[in-house]
């Protein structure tokens, strides 16, 4: 049996990174219940309120996941200096974010390191 090593929440240069692994390739309703709790807890505990959500392994998500990341962003926006960005979007997921114009709310980055560098500048 493969050990589940994600989601992984860690700090890098005072930025909270939420990294979803290969087992989160498809973010459908079945996996969102536990993931919702983890992401919102990480967002609420982020200090400073800077968060990168790394979706490098995610190939599909639907409206329920978009609602979750919108709630995460909204919680961070309510905090002074709060920022929320996405990194590592696969082509399909990036297209979904762009078609829905959510890229106007959230900055998109190819890598976690690029996202952190921009958040820290």
Image: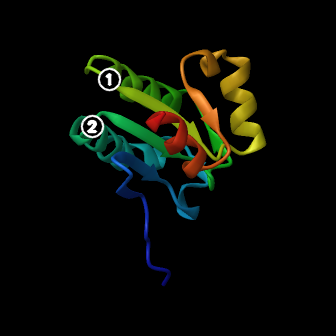
User: Left or right: 6 with respect to 38?
Assistant: right
Residue at left offset 62%, top offset 56%: 57
Bin the neighbour count of mark 2 within 10 Å (Cα to Cα): few under 14, some 14-19, many 20 and up. some
Where is residue 29? Give x, y as percent: 48, 41
Question: Residue furthest toward the front?
Answer: 121
Where is residue 87? Give x, y as percent: 59, 43
The front one of 28 and 40 is 40
Residue position for label 1: 81
Residue at left offset 51%, top offset 33%: 85
82 shown above or below 11:
above
Where is residue 36? Give x, y as percent: 36, 40
Q: CA distance from mark 1 to mark 2?
A: 8 Å
Q: How is the image coloured?
A: rainbow
Where is residue 42? Give x, y as percent: 29, 44
Residue position for label 2: 48
The label number, if any, that marks residue 92 in the structure image: none
Q: If you read the primary sequence from the N terminus, does the residue marked by circle 1 or circle 2 appear first? A: 2
The front one of 37 and 15 is 15
User: Left or right: 98 with respect to 116?
Assistant: right
57 shown above or below 75:
below
User: Left or right: 97 with respect to 45?
Assistant: right
Label 2's element?
loop
Residue at left offset 47%, top offset 47%: 30
Total tally of numbered discs in the picture: 2
Query: Is disc 1 in contact with disc 2, using a CB cutoff of under 8 Å?
Result: yes
């Amino acid at each position: 049996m493969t050990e589940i090593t994600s989601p992984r929440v860690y700090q890098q240069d005072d930025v909270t990174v939420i990294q979803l692994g290969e087992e989160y390739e498809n973010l459908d309703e079945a996996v969102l219940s536990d993931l919702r709790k983890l992401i919102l807890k990480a967002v609420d505990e982020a200090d400073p309120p800077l968060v990168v959500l790394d979706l490098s392994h995610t190939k599909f998500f639907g409206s329920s996941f978009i609602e979750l990341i919108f709630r995460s962003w909204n919680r961070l926006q309510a905090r002074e200096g709060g920022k929320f960005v996405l990194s590592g979007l696969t082509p399909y997921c990036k297209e979904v974010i762009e078609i829905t114009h959510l890229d106007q709310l959230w900055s998109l980055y190819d890598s976690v390191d690029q996202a952190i560098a921009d958040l820290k500048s």
